[in-house]
Image (cartoon, helix red, strand yellow):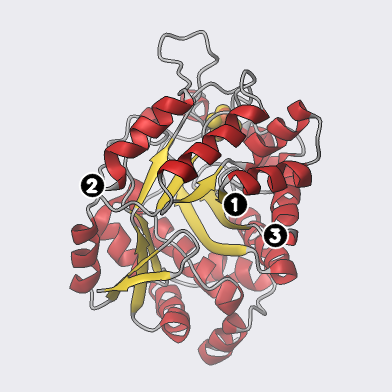
């Protein structure tokens, strides 16, 4: 396929699994960047969105215990924690007005001591106290566990959570869908089907979500292509994914690092390739691809935008999952993001949780 055909097929969301695998295996990074930014320009021109958000990890106690996770605790360690609802409210209060927060990403471990009542009350209180906030809450693992514990279906749980204030579901937990990879990552058997089922149920009843891929561990290009292709297939059913974020695995302090299976984090070239290939694979079907400055810094964020990402992500305050790997992450004020985008000739657009425009800068 020549470049023009590729851009056309991309925009129509017509790339096949083998086309995506070909992009991973055969096409050099500058060419991928060029095609991806052409696709991105066709979709959103020179506008790039960002959101003023807060990430809150309300508990680090988790009974899943994945090999790639440095964040979880069993509950016996001195640094295990679970926030009361009042504590969550206090945390949000610190940032809400000061930073004009419009999105709250709230997720934590799969904590067996919490039940459905905690979450319903939590979301209700958040919406009462901070009406401007769109709640982007709970991973598919948390959702499945809460439903199981309450002995109700995922659909019933999602409806109750929505009535209490949940607006969207974050795409965490997708990692790489292929079961050979998930086995090594220590994800429970069938967890990829669980992820897809929860997302499909949410989309069917009108709850939007995001999607992710975690790369740079034990996967190969087929696994990545297969992952993108499965996301695209689900997207074609309900168009429930608002955005897609590929992010690189942080091995620090994880079992995968301890065992020697993953020695280094994947670097800049891999980040750019994955952003560009996602952009090309999804085309207009999934129009927003997000850069992950949180793990890669502002300069890589800028390069990602120049290679097909059209959303910067969020300002992010109080995130605890990445720091648990030993990696220092900062927070970005709105002004820093605006500057970073203008520096590379883009028009910054502040958006809300549902990707609606709040302000064009
Ligand atoms: S990745 Fe999530 S589900 Fe897995 S151990 Fe960490 S907190 Fe638990």
Check disc 1 and report its element: helix, strand or loop: loop
- Disc 1 vs disc 3: Cβ atoms closer than 8 Å? no
Say which residue label 1 marks: 220
Q: Can you tell which of label 1 and label 3 is closer to the viewer? A: 3
Name the quarter where the C terminus is drawn: bottom left
Check disc 2 and report its element: helix, strand or loop: loop
Number of the label disc, if any, that sits on residue 98: 2
In the rendering, at what x and y percent does residue 310 appear?
41, 71
| Left or right: where 254 falls relative to 189 | left
Number of the label disc, if any, that sits on residue 203: 3
Q: Quadrant of ligand 1?
A: top right
- Disc 2 vs disc 3: Cβ atoms closer than 8 Å? no
Q: Residues within 10 Å of mark 1 (few under 14, many from 20)?
A: some
| Left or right: where 193 falls relative to 51 | right
Question: What residue is at 18 percent from the left and 66 percent from the top?
Answer: 339
Examine the rendered structure and indicate whether residue 315 appears above or below residue 352: above
Question: What residue is at 56 percent from the left and 47 percent from the top?
Answer: 165
Q: Nearer the viewer, residue 110 or 136?
A: 136
Q: Nearer the viewer, residue 66 or 31?
A: 66
In the rendering, at what x and y percent does residue 243 appear?
52, 63
Check disc 3 and report its element: helix, strand or loop: helix
Does the Cβ of the disc 1 residue fall within 8 Å of ligand 1?
A: no
């Amino acid at each position: 396929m020549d470049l023009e055909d590729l851009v056309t097929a991309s925009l129509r969301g017509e790339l096949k699994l083998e086309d995506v695998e070909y992009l991973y295996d055969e096409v050099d990074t500058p060419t991928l960047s060029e095609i991806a930014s052409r696709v991105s320009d066709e979709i959103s021109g020179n506008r790039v969105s960002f959101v003023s958000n807060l990430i809150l990890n309300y508990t680090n106690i988790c009974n899943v215990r994945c090999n790639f996770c440095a964040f979880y605790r069993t509950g016996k360690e001195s640094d295990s924690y679970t926030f009361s609802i009042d504590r969550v409210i206090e945390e949000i209060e610190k940032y809400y007005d000061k930073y004009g927060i419009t999105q709250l990403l709230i997720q934590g471990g799969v904590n067996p001591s919490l039940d459905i009542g905690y979450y319903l009350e939590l979301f209700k209180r958040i919406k009462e106290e901070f009406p401007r906030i769109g709640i982007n809450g709970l991973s598919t693992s948390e959702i499945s566990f809460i439903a199981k514990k309450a002995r109700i279906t995922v659909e019933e749980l999602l409806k109750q959570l929505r009535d209490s204030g949940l607006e969207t579901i974050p795409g965490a937990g997708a990692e790489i869908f292929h079961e050979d990879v998930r086995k090594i990552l220590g994800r429970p058997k069938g967890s990829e089907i669980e992820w897809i089922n929860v997302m499909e149920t949410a989309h069917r009843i009108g709850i939007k979500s995001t999607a992710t891929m975690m790369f740079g561990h034990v996967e190969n290009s087929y696994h990545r292509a297969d992952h993108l292709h499965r996301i695209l297939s689900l997207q074609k059913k309900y168009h429930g994914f608002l955005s897609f974020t590929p992010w690189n695995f942080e091995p620090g302090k994880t079992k995968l690092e301890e065992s020697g299976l993953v020695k280094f984090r994947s670097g800049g070239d891999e980040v750019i390739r994955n952003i560009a290939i996602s952009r090309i694979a999804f085309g207009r079907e999934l129009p927003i691809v997000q850069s992950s400055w949180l793990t890669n810094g502002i300069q890589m964020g800028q390069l990602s935008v120049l290679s097909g990402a059209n959303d910067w992500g969020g300002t992010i305050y109080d995130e605890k999952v990445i720091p648990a790997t030993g990696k220092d992450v900062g927070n970005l004020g709105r002004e820093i993001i605006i500057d970073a985008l203008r520096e590379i000739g883009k028009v910054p657009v502040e958006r809300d949780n549902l990707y609606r425009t709040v302000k064009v800068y």
